[in-house]
Image (spheres, rainbow, N blue to C red):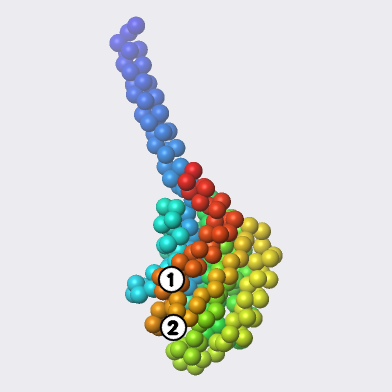
Amino acid sequence: MSWAHRAWLGVLGVVVLLGGGLLVEARADDRTAVAPRLYAVGHSWVVGTSSGEQIGYVHELAARVGAQVVDADHTGFRAPQVRRLVDGAPRCRPSDLAVVQVGLNDVRLRGESGLRPFRRALRGILARLDGCDVVVVREPGALDYRRSVGRVLGSTHVLDDYRRVTADLVLTRPRTTMVTPVLAPGQYLVDGLHPNLSGNRTIARAISRSAAWRAFARRVKG
């Protein structure tokens, strides 16, 4: 065998070894890329406030199974704003579980006048999340609307209308589940607006009882 031939075989062997290593690395990266994530969508209850005063319940959910949370560009104020953020963000993947909660600020600040924009926004959010399982958290009660800043437009009566719209939309969507946690007055922070740790645990517990969550937890654990 000539020197040139031996040299060529040596180079080929290195290429094969490197190629095999790159293939293994690519497969590892691919497994990481498709790792199930919690796709958090909604207002401050979901992922917490920027001040850190309130820690979102999605982090408690993630800690239960060791899942990654994706919340960048998904946390908004009212439902139309959340929809714009979700529309401009990467879509969820089939292995993900999206947790959606919107409506609190629409009820507080817009009252009945915000109901139609809320319906359009939630419909658009759910359509954008058609690539993965979705759990919609329907807004709980026991909120003291009198503590809202500015003119108070929200009420328990108005909240009931938003709840009905939420339920109607969920029923029209495949792979979408609704949970309705019930919070007691003592499960809010002193601001009367955000749930405390006990409130977060109640919401997380309601989500974890759903079939969608149980399927997600199995995917995470592999």
In the image, 216: left or right of 160?
Answer: left
Q: Which residue is mark 1?
A: 198
> Compared to 129, does 49 lie above or below?
below
Front residue of 74 and 198: 198
> Compared to 158, does 81 lie above or below?
above
Q: Residue at point 40% right, 79% down? A: 189
Three-letter amino acid code of the residue under disc 2 = Gly
Whether residue 12 can be seen here? yes
Label 2 neighbour load within 10 Å: few <14, some 14-19, many 20+? some
Q: Residue at point 58% right, 59% down? A: 210
In the image, 167: left or right of 202?
Answer: right
- The image quarter containing residue 133 is bottom right
Measuring from the top left, give residue 100's x and y in whole percent: 54, 66
Measuring from the top left, give residue 176's x and y in whole percent: 62, 61
Three-letter amino acid code of the residue under disc 1 = Ser
Residue at the top extreme?
1
Front residue of 154 and 93: 154
Measuring from the top left, give residue 216's x and y in whole percent: 53, 52
* SS of the residue under disc 2: loop
Label 1 neighbour load within 10 Å: few <14, some 14-19, many 20+? some
Front residue of 59 and 20: 59
> Compared to 11, does 57 lie above or below?
below
Q: Which residue is mark 2?
A: 192
Residue at the bottom extreme?
151
Whether residue 88 can be seen here? no
- The image quarter containing residue 140 is bottom right
* SS of the residue under disc 1: helix
Measuring from the top left, give residue 11's x and y in whole percent: 34, 21
